Every structure is written in structure tokens, then in C-alpha cells.
Amino acid sequence: MNYWLLTITFLSVNLDFFFMLLFLLKKYKLSNVLLGYLIGIIILLTASFTIGKILATLLPEWTLGILGILPIYLAFHDNDDDHSKKTTHHSDTVTVLITYLSVCAGCNLSIFLPVLANESNIDFLITLVFISVLTIIIVFIIKLIANIHLVSIIMKNYGEKLMKFCYVLIGLYVFWDSGLISHLLAII
């Protein structure tokens, strides 16, 4: 398990949602935002791991490296998601959860699936704990910096480019880590 890869993957996949967190933390209680975000993370990571396990059972490990195409595709694909969707719910936690799932489900599944596909069950549980801790830390950091103007400017100007760069790196890592590159080189 590569903690640096997990950290970079988490940060790059959720970069666009960090903007939403700035607004959600101003609107709702910290505990409601944190709980909704954590539930969403756990749902998407579990789905990615489960789908990855099914594919790993059916296919040789090196073929799963082809999944590295997903993050690279997302890096070059225009994101036309409508982040302004309004939801009305009785629970602030459910509002945060649905907002997170609607904004980040596709990216999280596409990016985390190849990263988690070859993890053991125990490694996946460790990953869940690790990503949950990162989620808690990020929410508190964003809560602290929510009012800093410079942060908003930097994210607005460079956030998307940084996110796309990270997606490409993750895709290339999946190619290499799965053995796809060495398998293809052996054929040539």
C-alpha cells in the first residue's frame, strides 16, 4: 500500500469538492459537514474496491493496468458537471452527502478503482481508516482557511490544472504498478 499515492489520489480527486466544502462549512455545522463527507467517501471507496475485486477475480493483474486510462481520460476530458444543483433535505448531513456524491462520484470511482483493485481486504480497511483521517484533517484545514482570500484565488487560478496533472500521474502509476508496462515490454 502506497500512502503517498493514496494521499495524492484523495487530494486530486476531491480538489473540486474542497471549493464546495468552503461553502458548506459556512452554511452548516462542522460536524454535519464532516459526517456527510465521511459517509460519501466510505461509500465511494467501498464501491471502487468491490468493483476492483470483481475485475481482479476475472482478469490477470497486469490487465487491470488498463484502468490507468480512466484517470488520464478524466485529466483531458472537460468536466461539465453542474455544481450548482440545489438539493433540499431535512438533514444537513444528508445534504452534504448528496452534494458530495453528485459532484464526485464519477471521478472517485474512476480514479480509486484502479488504485484499490489489487489491495487485500486488510489493506483496504487500512486505506479506509487512512482516507477517513485525511478527510477529517482536510475538513478542519479548510474550516481554518475558509476566510483566507489568497487561498481562493490560487484554487481558482490553478486548481483545475493541478488536479489534471495529478490525474495523469495517478494513471501512469497504475500502468506501472499493475505490471502492464513490463508485460507490454516483454511482448515487444
Image: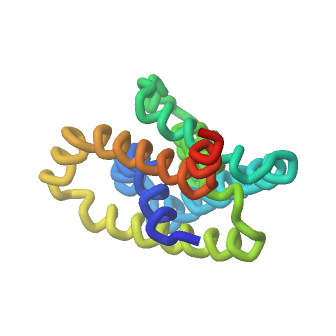
Vertical placement of 117 versus 31: above or below? above
Q: Is residue 141 left or right of residue 74?
A: left
Quadrant holding the C terminus? top right
Q: How many marks?
A: 0
- Residue 89 visible? The answer is no
Quarter residue 187 falls in: top right
Of residue 157 and residue 172, the one placed in the foreground of this image is 172
Give the farthest residue toward the left.
Answer: 150
Q: How is the image coloured?
A: rainbow
Which residue is located at x 29 percent, y 39 percent? 161
- Residue 126 visible? The answer is yes
Which residue is located at x 49 percent, y 53 percent? 173
Quadrant holding the N terminus? bottom right
Q: Is residue 132 left or right of residue 84?
A: right
Q: Position of residue 16 (x, y in %)?
A: 39, 43
Q: Position of residue 122 (x, y in %)?
A: 74, 76
Q: Is residue 168 left or right of residue 116?
A: left
